[in-house]
Image (spheres, helix red, strand yellow):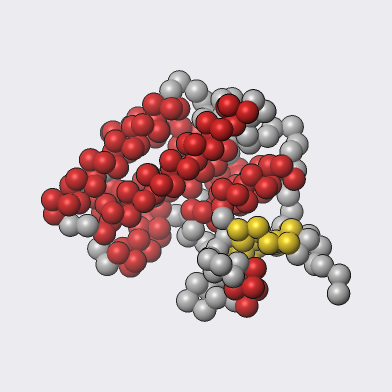
Amino acid sequence: MAAEKGVKLLDYWVSPFGQRCRIALAEKGIEYEHKEENLGDKSDLLLKSNPIYKKIPVLLHDGNPISESLIIVQYIDETWPGESPFLPSDPYARAQARFWADFIDKKVYECSKRVFSLKGEAQEEAKKEFIGFLKTVEAELGEKKYFGGDTLGFVDISLVPFTSWFYTYEAIAGISVEAECAKLAAWAKRCSERDSVARALQDPKKICDVVKSIFVV
């Protein structure tokens, strides 16, 4: 039987990792089928496509599955390079972009989960650490329009889904990104004005409700 042609994204609406893929596909102008998964009752297609982690997102390109959001975004960039690549052509600059995307996952995202799940003194320590990570990322942005320079790049796509969590950081933990990291907040606003980002990001209040349900805040 011939492999299924076309592009399909297995996803879940609130997932920032799935949103990365949606933004990348939109930036490249790629038509695709979006399949919303029920994470409480995962489809056979998801389990077959990602048998190791059994997680979304998964990109299916002509029947071939690609897992893990940062890998998917790089695959999209390499498969449909277009006029505005996400990753720079210089090997060192490309390595730096990958470093910061990895930092976002391993430091910013992981620390945010501790902020939501911990209480008391432990939460206060996590909040300080989290703000420090945000300031580190903001320093990397510097005075640039985007992390990628004048165009939306790999690091921007990696981080921007979490901007719709800014409301949640403040509502649950009292962390105002605008007060702590004004340049990062301004960058988030610039990104939100792009159609690819605006269509992918979700209502911050709905995200807050989901986070509360997960961490029983």
Q: Residue at x 75, y 36 (%)?
A: 82
Answer with left or right where residue 38 lies relative to residue 58: left
Asked if one can make out residue 160 in the rendered structure from this viewpoint, the answer is: no
Question: Which quadrant holds the N terminus?
Answer: bottom right
Q: Residue at x 59, y 31 (%)?
A: 94
Where 5 falls versus 183 (above or below)? below
Where 159 falls versus 53 (above or below)? above
Answer with left or right where residue 65 lies relative to residue 17: right
Where 56 falls versus 110 (above or below)? below
Where residue 138 sits, quadrant-wise, is: top left
Answer with left or right where residue 206 lies relative to residue 63: left
Q: Residue at x 43, y 40 (%)?
A: 103
Q: Nearer the viewer, residue 77 or 195?
A: 77
Answer with left or right where residue 63 lies relative to residue 35: right
The location of residue 33, given as percent across then percent down, is 70, 62
Where residue 63 sits, quadrant-wise, is: bottom right
The location of residue 68, given as percent across then percent down, is 56, 55
Question: Which quadrant holds the C terminus?
Answer: bottom left
The location of residue 30, given as percent across then percent down, is 73, 49
The location of residue 42, given as percent across then percent down, is 55, 75
Where residue 185 sits, quadrant-wise, is: top left
> Which residue, as the protein is rendered here, is positioned at the far top?
143
Asked if one can make out residue 164 in the rendered structure from this viewpoint, the answer is: yes
Number of marks: 0
Q: Residue at x 63, y 28 (%)?
A: 91
> Which residue, as the protein is rendered here, is positioned at the far right?
2
